[in-house]
Image (cartoon, rainbow, N blue to C red):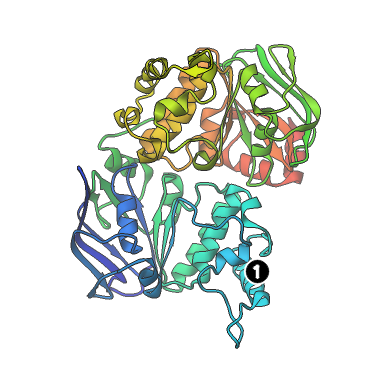
Amino acid sequence: MNIQSTPLWEFVDVSKAYPGVLANDRVCIRLMPGSIHGLLGENGCGKSTLIKTLSGVQQPDSGRILHNGKEVQIADPQDARDKGIATVFQEFSIVPTLSVGENIFLGNMPRSRIGMIDWNKVNSDAAAVLAEMEVDIDPQAITGRLSVGEQQLVEIASAVAMDAKMIILDEPTAALGENEIERLHQLLRKMRSRGTAILYVSHRLDEVERIVDEVTILRGGRVVRASGETEINVGQIVSAMVGEDIAEHYPKENNATDQVVLEARDLTTKAGVRDVSFELHKGEVLGLGGVLGSGRTEIARALFGVDPLLHGEVSLNGKLLEIRHEMDAINAGLALVPENRKFDGLFFNFRASGNITAASLGSISRFGVLDLKAEENGTRQLIEELEVSAQAEEKTVNFLSGGNQQKIVIARWLFSEAEVLILDEPTQGIDIGAKIAVYNLINALTKTGKSIILISSDHDELLAMSDRIAVVQHGTVKRVVPAQELTHDDLVRASANPMEGATMEAAQ
């Protein structure tokens, strides 16, 4: 709650333009100490531009920035830090080859009296920050070897370690599971009680409803609902963000049949998958439910040949597959949309067409030479059907929004005519409009007989869009339950608590 009436930071009529785009149009926002302020809007609405201005990455073209009522300039990111602003960007800024402790204190390493880095203090102070966050990560672990979710927590720990008066969190829970989200929210409430101002950006509207005190909503670079004018409930927020009512957030269609398409038996890998067995039916969406680190992504990697099987079998349409690496999986008709599309899913120096055909180059090659005209013709229909931005045909994918990027990764596997698609966090970091487009695409795929394995840390999404859910604990599938028989609370307990899961299993 606010502890004083003067904003800690205030934007007054701030504007910023890029060639052909007015990203921020006379934006006004008041950020109070002791308050969690939600900044919401679809991709491309101007949120990222506003964050970059407040964190000193860029300068506004016009308008004023006030700090404790006095006009200031934020010259650069170091100046922002000196003024007490810590920013956790959606795109990770960690150095993967450094330790967790080094990343937490990067640029501000504890030093001894003679000016040398005090490594004992680096590790002990990092351990103290992680303990406050209730996060069990070794400060001496190499950050690049951690999971995406753990790397996200290291980013947040770096901001906490600054003891900043103002923290900007851009999609802080995108890679986190339910338990980690709740621990983060507890930490934010504690920081709020100490008088910290928090700017919270998220596409997960249900969690926004739980955590924020006030909301500003942007559309087309302008403030369409200011703090005090906006009710903090999902329906009102969605209406303001997209300019129309959306009654159905999860437009699920039931296209599952009894025909078994894929069967996994006793899959085991060095990455922690242990005796995993399940069946996937034609037209079905099989959800993998579990907490961060439960082994959901590792199961996907095992199926797709990223992590070799120590033992176990995978059959497709009754035929035993020999999957030694990814190309074996692709040739068999499997597809993987990875959890981290930035690092594992896209070629950012390619346009949409080059990304879409990457897994099926043989179909557009003649005598070993790529037929670029065939590539262009073959991908144009997919770009139109998936309603990917028209810019995708001319510009490289790094210029596209997260939603468009995700559609392009999915289009790759439609082009390859994959029969089974593994979607690992397919709506992570994309806005409500793009999410609904992905849900509709899932329906369209299952309607044509495609089968989908869906991994999602958003339990509401997982329950709504799955036909059945396989509960994953400690690298193994404990049970498979029809989605309609589970509630949000059931899934949290079942995936997090082995004893609770055993009780549920006995009751089935």
Judging depth in this view, the residue of 231 and 93 nearest the camera is 93
The residue furthest right is: 311
Q: Quadrant of residue 351?
A: top left
| Residue drawn at x 29%, y 38% as measured from the top left | 242
5 w.r.t. 344: above or below = below
| Residue drawn at x 30%, y 56% as measured from the top left | 50
In which quadrant of the rendered image does the N terminus lie?
A: bottom left
Visible in this render: residue 252? Answer: no
Query: Which residue in the structure is indicated by mark 1?
Result: 127
Where does the image place residue 360, in percent across and percent down from the top left? 53, 20
Visible in this render: residue 112? Answer: yes
User: Alpha-carbon neighbours of circle 1 within 10 Å: few (<14), some, or many (≥20)?
Assistant: many
Relative side of 323 to 428, left or right: right
Judging depth in this view, the residue of 384 and 430 nearest the camera is 384
Q: Mark 1: which secondary structure?
A: helix
In which quadrant of the rendered image does the C terminus lie?
A: top right
Judging depth in this view, the residue of 6 and 83 nearest the camera is 83
The residue furthest bottom is: 113
Where does the image place residue 210, in percent across and percent down from the top left? 45, 52
Relative side of 480 to 309, left or right: left
| Residue drawn at x 49%, y 53% as measured from the top left | 92
**For the residue marked with disc 1, what is the amino acid?**
Ala
Where does the image place residue 51, in percent across and percent down from the top left? 34, 57
Q: Quadrant of residue 42?
A: top left
Relative side of 353 to 468, left or right: left
Count every numbered label the image shows and give the total. Answer: 1
Where does the image place residue 208, in percent across and percent down from the top left? 42, 51
| Residue drawn at x 60%, y 53% as measured from the top left | 150
